[in-house]
Amino acid sequence: MSNNWEMVIGLEVHAQLNTSSKLFSSSPNQFGSEPNENVNFIDSGMPGMLPVMNFACIEMAIKTGFALNFNINKYSVFERKNYFYPDLPQGYQISQFEFPILTEGFINIDNEGNQKKIRIERAHLEQDAGKSIHDIDPKFSFIDLNRVGTPLLEIVSYPDLSSAEEVVSYMSSLRQVLMYIDVCDGNMQEGSLRADVNLSVRKKGGELGTRCEIKNLNSFKFIRQAIEYEFKRQIDVIESGGKIEQNTMLFDTSTGETRAMRSKEFSHDYRYFPDPDLLPVNLTQNQIDKVKTSVGELPQAKLDKFIKDYNVDKDIAKIITVEKQNAILFEKMISETDVKPKFIAAWLVGDIFAFIKENNLEVSSLNEKTKEITDLLKLVSDDVISNKAGKEILPKVLNGQGKPSDIVKELGLEQVSDSGELEKIIDEALIGEEENISKFQGGSDRVLGYFVGKCLKATKGKGNPKLINKILLRRLKK
Amino acid sequence: MKSSISQIKASLRDKKISVEELYDEFLIKAKSSKTNSFNLLLDKENNTLSIKESQKRYENGNPLPLDGIPLGIKDLFCTKGIRTTASSKILSNFTPNYESFVTQKLLDDGSIFIGKNNCDEFAMGSSNETSFFGPVKNPWKNKNVPTNDLVPGGSSGGSAAAVAEGTCVASMGTDTGGSIRQPASLCGIVGLKPTFGSCSRWGIVAFASSLDQAGPLTNSVEDAALILNSINKHDFNDSTSSNHVREDYSFGINDKLDQKIKIGIPSDYLKDVSRDILSQIENTKKALIKHNVEFVDVEFKTTEYALSTYYILAPAEASSNLARYDGIRYGVREDGKSLDDIYLNSRTKGFGDEVIRRILIGAYVLSAGYYDAYYRQAQKVRRLIKDDFQRIFNDVDFILTPTTPNEAFKIGDKLDPISMYKNDIYTVPTSLAGLPGISIPSGLSTNGLPLGIQFIGNYFEEKKLLQIAALAEKELNFNEQ
């Protein structure tokens, strides 16, 4: 394959809004219920049933509008997208078409240290369809309508993306923002966030090619695989003299290949028209402004704050801001103690996250234990106990086995920081060491380590190493 | 002359008749009727409890507004536990597990349902001939050809025929382009289509959502007002339901007009009408002019576009509203080798010709490449029609028109859909504008068949509209003619 090809990618991301009820019915919007449990007469398309808009969905769209720099349109219209399928009981999907609620937004993504602005054409609200299950029985298909009518925000980017890495970076930035503003739980495995990838290839800087759309990718891994496969496939077709047809593709997760689902000739005519059961959405400035206050701090702003105001290392700050719950935990700890944020941050991404990972916990589960954690970190930063002792105690504290100070006492881990006591110990340690003392005074720094070790050993590891160091230096320099 | 709701209530209160006796009287008459105006008559057992409770309320001296009144319900309203078919084969086995908003209000006010009235399939028709359960016969006969069976009009033909022959006191109908007013006119009764947004559409099998509106078919204007009191309520479950303040529509309905009323008569409506029709308007004029009513000629600019606009918009909405009848979850399913076959067979066999015709028209006008030329254009014209009405209402209080361009015709006479559509020429513009309209019987044709006139009011002015209609009713004295 020659190197002078490039890919042009636009993304349609479907984010499921985490409202308590559906977009146009009062059924619960939740994952993992028994099949057809969250279905009412509206969802099942019974005669005479009417949709009623759930305003919480509009508020979440507005919130997204602020977070992704969109124009928030005061006037938007729900239309019907008509097609037949058994998991679409009404025979149409209610979606926004000609007048979407959000237009012309953007997000900055980080690509190997460089910032790139990705423009977003529009975002609109729509209903999800149900699920058809074809692989349970050889003869029958099964329908689960639980997902029918759950609210989706479809976010459509411009074709500004030019590599799988950029797509993943874009998608994870979107995910991060949507989770920060609490409109989507970001759970890709459960389908809360999924993407359709529109990809075409061209000679570098050349004319745009014909695009294919790869449907319904729900993991970063699959997105990457599908893009790489489809990129090669299109180039192969063109280089062997063929033409790309505008197809809708499916990604087969077992083979890692894309294959055509339907060609443009067979594409549906959805016969969109404004849903006469619903009034157009007319928002007032007041309604929009009200939502603005609930947007909260966005990931980029938090990152900047952590680095600039809290003096946290960039890489550590990034790890903390990846997920909102990390940042919440971090900020809660900061607010409860005078221990330096930088010190807390290092512990958080180190031993604390390690503990969470080992025990398969949610970060947020520690929100209740911040007092104990910061008490412990305070003991470490004040040299009451050693770093090593702190690491030893942390799991006990997180497991709720007692107050840090109690555990320290119980295990006798308190450092000896009484300088009188330490001086005595040092005095004893220096007896018979005249040779080494003169080595040190002759310029051999290594000897200092030897003395510190000897003193620590004499305190059974409880001596405050910093203090020992200090006293030793003073004594040796005499 | 048939008794009015207030007269019946008085008899029940004065124990001249019991609720059960009243019910039996209507049920027996309905059972022996030959008009085919009911798709389903309820078993008496269904109503035993409500009859008893109603009787108790009369005995306790606190009857509800419609207590014990036997009603017919167009088979387009979903009624809990009672088969609801929309007169279509595809729903011929469908029993909803919910009660429509409007019928629930009628039940809440003590009325008792006799049965489900026949209608055109999915309310698509103007003669009740498209029903899967067969045509309804108008109780009226042409005195010159008395052997002919005539249509009752449509789509609420069963409702109109049942009220006219006295097998229910009143019936709930729906009106999309004239489906209450036109059959009321052809059967010599009163039919009211309220302002769009007055009565909730929740639980009514949808035909064209932006036009459908429930309303009563009754023996008198006062009865229509009483029923309107029950059903005209705001409903949060219908996004197009208006939350304006409702009035008591029957209170003071027969009071003298306290100010001068100006009524416009659209000259363009009367261009090619028969003498029979013209004389209805003339008689009404004569009857009202002595009551401080002034008549003026008005002229619409949009009348000639109304029918084509309607027959783009209503089918467009219908094509989508009827997509849910796919044989998958409920209703009649026809087998097939593939999913597409199941859809094709169920819908081809489940829907009648007129319904299929309108689905096809609707799908066509919404298709890519045709949408702008048909659907979008029709929406624009609809706006102009609304504006046209408002221009005229700047100058007049009401508009008076014939309800229909002709009297009841013979079953099977109008086979050509276009000539059938023309039956709604006077009612469709009002529907497109969303305005309230009432048809009252005004006189008989030379063939001895009833004819009606229509009063059109401005939005949510049902109170005034019912008052003027009541006055005209009294002066025209149709029931004594």
Image (tube, rainbow, N blue to C red):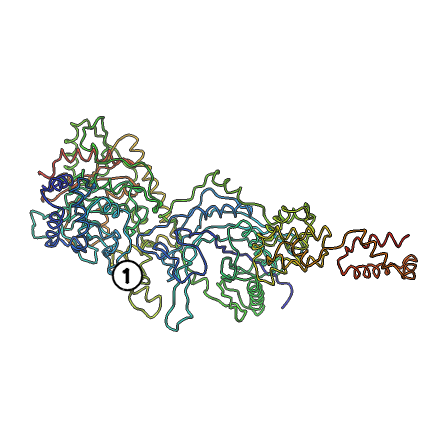
Figure check: B339 above or below B14: below
Q: Residues within 10 Å of mark 1 (few under 14, many from 20)?
A: many
Q: Quadrant of residue A162?
A: bottom right
**Of all residues shown, which one is farthest toward the bottom?**
A138
Q: Quadrant of residue B358?
A: bottom left
Figure check: B328 above or below B79: below
Please provide percent x and percent y for residue B406. Answer: 17, 44
| Residue nearest the observer in this picture, B290 or B72 | B72
Mark 1 residue element: loop
| Residue nearest the observer in this picture, A66 or B376 | A66
Please provide percent x and percent y for residue A317. Answer: 66, 52
Image quadrant in which the C terminus of chain B is located:
top left
Query: Dot 1 corresponds to which residue?
Result: B331
Please provide percent x and percent y for residue A460. Answer: 76, 61
Figure check: B94 above or below B11: below
The tally of labels here is 1
Q: Pinpoint the chain carrying mark 1.
A: B
Please provide percent x and percent y for residue B353. Answer: 25, 58
Horizontally, residue B308 falls left or right of residue B12, namely: right
**Residue in the image at 23% along x and 44% along y:** B109
Horizontally, residue A321 falls left or right of residue B243, namely: right
| Residue nearest the observer in this picture, A161 or B360 | A161
| Residue nearest the observer in this picture, A302 or B262 | A302
Image quadrant in which the N terminus of chain B is located:
top left
Whether residue A126 is visible, yes or no, is yes
Three-letter code for the amino acid on which mark 1 is drawn:
Gly
Horizontally, residue A96 falls left or right of residue B450, namely: right
Whether residue B405 is visible, yes or no, is no
